[in-house]
Amino acid sequence: MSIITPVYRTDLGHLAECLDSVAAQTYADWEQIVVDDGSRQTALTQLLEIRARAEPRLRVITSNDNAGIVAASSTALASATGEFVVMLDHDDVLDPHALERLVAAMRMATDAPFGYSDNDILRADGRLAQPFYKPDFSLERLRSHNYVLHCVIARRQAVLDVGGFRVGFDGAQDHDLLLRLSELGAAVHVPEVLYHWREAPASVAADPDAKPYAYDAGVRSVQDHLDRVGVDATVATGTTPGVYRIERRVTGEPLVSVVIPTRGTSSMVWGDRRCHVVECVRSMLERSEYQRLEFVVVADTDTPSEVLAGLTALDSRRVGVVPFVAEFNFSAKVNAGADAASGDVLLILNDDTELIEPGSVGEMLGLLQQRDVGVVGAKLLYGDGTLQHAGHVFPGLATHALLGYPGDHPGPYRMCLVERECSGVTAAAAMITSARYAEFGGFDEQLPNNFNDVDLCFRMRSAGLRILWTPHAGWFHFESVTRDPTTGDAERDLLVSRWRHELECDPYFNPNLAPRRSDWLERPGRSGAPPYYRDERNRRRFG
């Protein structure tokens, strides 16, 4: 294990704590390579000399000039001899079990080019705070921001094979390296806080705006990665430091069939009575920037005739109605719509939705055109502007991530600002190719009311496909005004019988978070924060 630590005019106390944390590791087979990048500080030189004499596993390389973090990291890498390398900042601190846990994970995941752990913030007052409980590897999220951060272990040969640290990417050198390593395969995640990221005055941990040059380098890193893997897109800085906005170009102009099951329900919304399906279609026709659309409305026989007339009056060439004569079955209705659709792509919408983001269809198409993507879901808001859907969350029966959060909230760890993998998305607004929908048999009609979307997403994930959610596609969803939202025991039992393991093990959640919640609240006592439960019932539930 070769630990790479570039140093430049660091606080001596912070550096001493960093070195101490390495010396205290329960895993003993390591070397630490500290590169003093032209600090020219006598006290720093003396500290490193004293430490190196006392610890034969510590090697110090001194550069005459300050060449930057990429050059210093490259010097350390060239000197490394370990099977694995670990990137450790000069003022950060490892948990005593960090190397042991990381090596064990890499030994188990033999195809993983790199691994990472959870981390927290080491505040200036010495307290640990803000634990970042990360998902398992999420390629799409890594493209939008470097959620991996610290602590990272990589196979040294893999790092060398992809070119090591690249000149010109100072400040984003880790993100750039991780993106290149991700092209070799998926990373392994250790869901433990093994790294304490120091909140020093000039660090990004303390001030996200401290290193603006890093974000410019980050844009170039992401753009280069997308170019290498054949994703036709442009990258720009996002609205928040460290988050990148990827705008994908749609290949061709595929016909998108918008499949909308309905029974023509009307209700009060924002003080006006509206027929939901008519307003759903109208919003798409009037606002969508992508206009190569056809609308396949699957209508129950009791749908009012004036509703059907109102639909065709919107655009008789693009709006068609498929009668549904059987007993209500949402899955069967969507399947009937898919059978009648002409498009290469299906956009399944609930009739009680209204388009918000004009670019939604194009955003979803750009993601869906990646060959390993099965379904793309969208951001849904309730009528009051609060968040209804940001991907499904498990363990337990599906719930919606961050349900009820403010609609413009960035979410914990910026998760509502970025495109990312999740275990499932709701069929209230979901896009899938017609060919793939047919290949997987569409929605299971044994699930007539609930969990049909969960089941389809699980089937696709079991075949190696990714399920994506994007914040850049959005609809209002006036949920539960068109049908009874209750969950039947038979459907629940069928889902559990098929997918018990998947329902209990969500790779995009984290075992340190309180289960069966949607708000990313940590389990009591995991980070030393005061417990949030107040009675024995909640202690049993979350403990």
Image: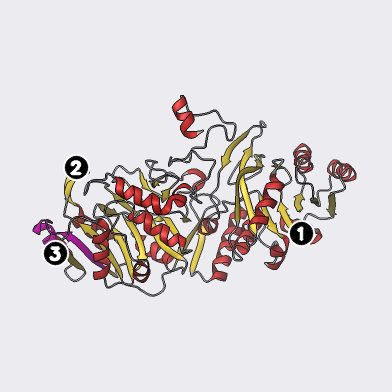
User: Which amino acid, mark 2?
Assistant: Gly
Q: Nearer the viewer, mark 1 or mark 3?
A: 1
User: Mark 2 sits on what residue?
Assistant: 271
Along the line of sight, the residue nearer the viewer: 70 or 60: 60
Q: Nearer the viewer, mark 1 or mark 2?
A: 1
User: Which amino acid, mark 3?
Assistant: Ala
**Sooner in the amino-acid sequence: mark 1 or mark 2:** 1
Q: Dot 3 surroundings within 10 Å: few (below 14), some, or many (20 or more)?
A: few
Q: Dot 2 surroundings within 10 Å: few (below 14), some, or many (20 or more)?
A: few
**Sooner in the amino-acid sequence: mark 3 or mark 2:** 2
Instruction: State the image coordinates of residue 265 (x, y, percent, origin top left).
Output: 17, 51
Q: Dot 1 surroundings within 10 Å: few (below 14), some, or many (20 or more)?
A: many
User: Which amino acid, mark 1?
Assistant: Leu
Along the line of sight, the residue nearer the viewer: 215 or 364: 364
Residue 81 lies left or right of residue 226; in this view the side is: right
Along the line of sight, the residue nearer the viewer: 366 or 441: 441
Q: Are marks 1 and 3 in contact (CB under 8 Å)?
A: no
User: Mark 3 sits on what residue?
Assistant: 313
* Helix, strand or loop status at disc 3: helix
Work out how far the residue at label 1 is from the one at label 3, CA to CA, in angstroms: 68 Å
Quarter location, residue 322: bottom left
Farthest residue to the bottom: give it: 252
Instruction: State the image coordinates of residue 46 (x, y, percent, origin top left).
Output: 88, 42
Q: Is residue 411 above or below residue 346?
A: above
* Helix, strand or loop status at disc 2: loop
Residue 180 lies left or right of residue 164; in this view the side is: left
**Sooner in the amino-acid sequence: mark 1 or mark 3:** 1
Q: Which residues are magenta?
A: 294-309
